[in-house]
Structure formats: C-alpha cells, structure tokens
Amino acid sequence: MNRWITPALLGLSVAASAAFAQGMVREAPRDVKPAMMAVSTTPPIVAIDGVETRLSPGARIRDTNNMLVLSGALAGKTVPTVYKRDSMGLVHEVWLLTPEEYSKVGGAKLGDPEGYKRFYELLNLVFAARAAMMLR
C-alpha cells in the first residue's frame, strides 16, 4: 500500500500544475509601443518603423503563443510587434502580433492620454482573445 503513495502524489502534483498552466492568462505589457519591426539579415540590427536600431544583448522576442523566438529565425522578415526598450535605448522585449492584432492596436491614437488608455484596452483585448484561443 505504501509503495503507491509516492507515485499517486507525483501524479496529482503534475495534474495540478497542468491545470494551473491552462488557467494562466498572458497579461498585456505596459509601456510598449506598436511598430513594424524589420529584422536585418544580420541580427541584432533591426529597423523599427524604418529607423535602424539594435536588439539588446539578451533581448526577448515572444511569438503569438508566448514562446521565445530567436532573432535569427526572423532574419530578413518584417513583422508587426509591440516592443519595449531598455535603459540604454536598445530594443529589449518584443511581442509579435498577428496582422489583425496590429491593425487593432496600431490604429490607436497615441498622442493624448485617452489614446494611451485606449491602446492598453485594445492590447488587453488582444492578449485575452489569444489566451482564450489557447485554452480551446
């Protein structure tokens, strides 16, 4: 009887962690800007809305499933994103968006406080819809 206790507890912990992982919702990042990012054929050089810049060492690029993507996998591509810079002004965190998501968040007016508020509302809707699709 005692020999089944350890495997049973292990199985329950795995099942509980799987259930917890399914309930996780990807939060919309704060202080991000929408942009089209063109990755050069020699990363870490990228162009954000036509302005050449660099990815920071250790830059994190997340795809639509919140999985990490290496910059080399995007070499020569132009992708819709929201991004955040580090303290040195280098692009440090990037979230890839679908064209539909980008049209939603890219169309927000970012010049006034209400525009920023609307941008973050749209971004939360995009990430909530994406999380709902992953739970199906």
Image (cartoon, rainbow, N blue to C red):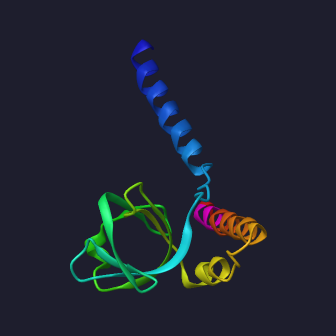
Vertical comparison of 69 with 109: above or below: above
Image quadrant holding the N terminus, namely top left
Task: Report x, y in % for residue 95.
Answer: 48, 67
Which is more toward the observer, 87 or 82? 87
Is 131 contained in the magenta span?
yes
Residue at screen point 65% across, 67% down: 123
Residue at screen point 65% across, 69% down: 126
Vertical comparison of 78 with 91: above or below: below
Which is more toward the observer, 82 or 13? 82
- Displayed quadrant of residue 116: bottom right
Task: Please state if 128 lies on the left or on the right of 42 as rendered.
Answer: right
Task: Report x, y in % for residue 3.
Answer: 39, 17
Number of numbered markers: 0
Task: Report x, y in % for residue 94.
Answer: 45, 66
Magenta span: chief secondary structure = helix
Q: Magenta segment, which residues?
A: 130-134
Task: Report x, y in % for residue 4.
Answer: 43, 21
